[in-house]
């Protein structure tokens, strides 16, 4: 395992613990006498004005967190995606085929399960992509706590699956969760993208220049109808991988930003988005199609999609399991892919914006499904591997 991956796992494991504490705190506060104050905090207005009324951005705190705060998270995701595809574990076809196929299977099957359960309700059906996401911080946090019970190769595999999963989630958000588009603002965003491409071609290695232009891009994307966080991804993909002296502006930015995202950005997102009042939750809400669809998609869909795809590829002789892994460990990691916390809540917020009942069902489904998936995955991975047969090597090896 490379030093960069070791640092990544160290941040993600600790960040997952902080993320869990923030989510638990949100649940406690929202179900306490401070619940009303928590709701007022999320609705706290914030406004930015530039040149009088030339540019006015007025949003409640929750929307600022989800639109601007999370753009920083998406910027980091973009950096991770580019690094992995340029020089990382996904740089070659042979390395990428197994996690890429597993990620696609792990997105498709949960979406199908959710859609089957909610097919009769077109409003609920907007949430079809909610159980397709994997929360890398929680998943890596659990495998890191399990230590040597999980081979290093499986940790790398899980990271690759989650990164491709994030890429798929970004594409889903861009295509399916946009509002009415503004041609003028899209043209402005396009001009910013051309500028970022030009900076890259000119071999500008000062990341601050990309960030400044990325902020302008964020405003245009926000006003265009496409979700603003995608500006973070686009900005990250423009950051150069290498300087003439061999250093890496992209990796420097990633390492500098990672602690801030792990210990501030994501915990704040969790605290503002995970709060759901259980005081008035009825039995109908707990077994509602949206709640069940999300939970079933995360627990069953992810395990079937990831494990089933890996099993098919290995049995067909088109790929080999990660070194030192056995099938039970692959099943455990596949279950951990069902921890969908951050991106699932984010997509659900886009799908059910302005619908309090569905937002409650969303949070219950995501929290319940993620907890069950985490518990099952940790239990399977904690079981001794004695007597388990390794996978058959691919044909021709």
Image (cartoon, rainbow, N blue to C red):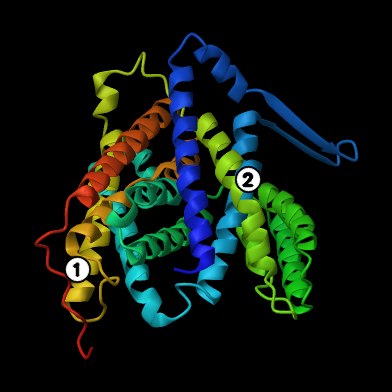
> For the residue carrying disc 2, how many other residues have a C-alpha within 10 Å: few (<14), some (14-19), or many (20+)?
some
Point out residue 101 in the picture as x, y percentages from the top left corner. Answer: 32, 69
Point out residue 103 in the picture as x, y percentages from the top left corner. Answer: 35, 63
Point out residue 316 in the picture as x, y percentages from the top left corner. Answer: 18, 79
Mark 1–mark 2 distance (CA, rounded to whole Å): 37 Å
Residue with the mark numbered 2: 260
Q: Residue furthest top?
A: 33
The answer to whether residue 229 is visible is no
Quadrant where the N terminus is found in the figure = bottom left
When the figure is inspected, residue 54 is found, relative to residue 393, above or below; the finding is above
Q: Is residue 126 left or right of residue 295?
A: right
Q: Nearer the viewer, residue 240 or 309?
A: 240
Q: Residue furthest bottom?
A: 396
Quadrant where the C terminus is found in the figure = bottom left
Q: Quadrant of residue 47?
A: top right
Q: Quadrant of residue 189?
A: bottom right
Report how many numbered discs are placed on residues in the image: 2
When the figure is inspected, residue 157 is found, relative to residue 294, above or below; the finding is below
The answer to whether residue 349 is visible is yes
Numbered mark located on residue 231 in the image? none
Residue with the mark numbered 1: 311
Q: Quadrant of residue 311?
A: bottom left
- Residue drawn where x is 48% and y is 77% of the image: 91
Q: Is residue 58 left or right of residue 23?
A: right
Q: Nearer the viewer, mark 1 or mark 2?
A: 2
Point out residue 223 in the picture as x, y percentages from the top left corner. Answer: 69, 47
Q: Secondary structure at mark 2?
A: helix
Q: Earlier in the sequence, mark 1 or mark 2?
A: 2
Q: Secondary structure at mark 1?
A: helix
- Residue drawn where x is 35% and y is 44% of the image: 125
Q: Nearer the viewer, residue 48 or 342?
A: 342
């Amino acid at each position: 395992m490379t030093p960069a991956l070791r640092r990544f796992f160290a941040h993600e494991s600790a960040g997952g613990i902080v993320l869990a504490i923030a989510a638990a705190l949100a649940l406690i506060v929202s179900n306490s006498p401070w619940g009303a104050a928590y709701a007022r905090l999320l609705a706290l207005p914030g406004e930015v004005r530039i040149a009088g009324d030339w540019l006015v951005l007025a949003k409640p705190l929750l929307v600022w967190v989800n639109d601007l705060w999370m753009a920083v998270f998406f910027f980091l995701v973009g950096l991770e995606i580019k690094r992995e595809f340029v020089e990382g574990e996904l740089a070659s076809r042979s390395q990428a085929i197994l996690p890429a196929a597993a990620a696609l299977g792990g997105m498709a099957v949960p979406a199908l399960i959710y859609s089957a359960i909610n097919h009769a309700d077109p409003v609920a059906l907007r949430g079809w992509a909610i159980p397709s996401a994997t929360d890398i911080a929680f998943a890596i946090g659990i495998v890191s706590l399990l230590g040597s019970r999980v081979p290093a190769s499986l940790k790398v595999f899980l990271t690759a699956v989650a990164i491709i999963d994030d890429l798929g989630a970004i594409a889903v958000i861009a295509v399916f969760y946009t509002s009415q588009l503004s041609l003028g603002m899209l043209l402005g965003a396009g001009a910013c993208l051309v500028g970022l491409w030009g900076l890259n071609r000119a071999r500008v290695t000062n990341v601050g220049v990309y960030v400044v232009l990325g902020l302008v891009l964020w405003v245009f994307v926000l006003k265009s109808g496409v979700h603003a966080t995608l500006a973070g991804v686009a900005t990250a993909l423009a950051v150069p991988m290498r300087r003439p002296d061999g250093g890496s502006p992209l990796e420097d930015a990633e390492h500098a930003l990672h602690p801030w995202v792990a210990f501030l950005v994501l915990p704040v997102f969790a605290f503002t988005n995970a709060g759901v009042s259980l005081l008035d939750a009825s039995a109908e809400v707990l077994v509602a199609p949206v709640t069940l669809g999300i939970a079933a998609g995360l627990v069953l869909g992810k395990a079937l999609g990831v494990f089933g795809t890996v099993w098919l590829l290995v049995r067909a002789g088109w790929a080999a399991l990660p070194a030192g892994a056995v099938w039970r460990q692959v099943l455990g990691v596949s279950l951990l892919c069902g921890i969908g916390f951050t991106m699932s809540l984010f997509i659900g917020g886009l799908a059910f914006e302005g619908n309090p009942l569905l937002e409650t069902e969303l949070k219950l489904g995501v929290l319940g499904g993620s907890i069950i998936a985490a518990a099952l995955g940790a239990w399977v991975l904690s079981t001794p591997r004695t007597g388990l047969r390794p996978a058959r090597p691919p044909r021709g090896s």
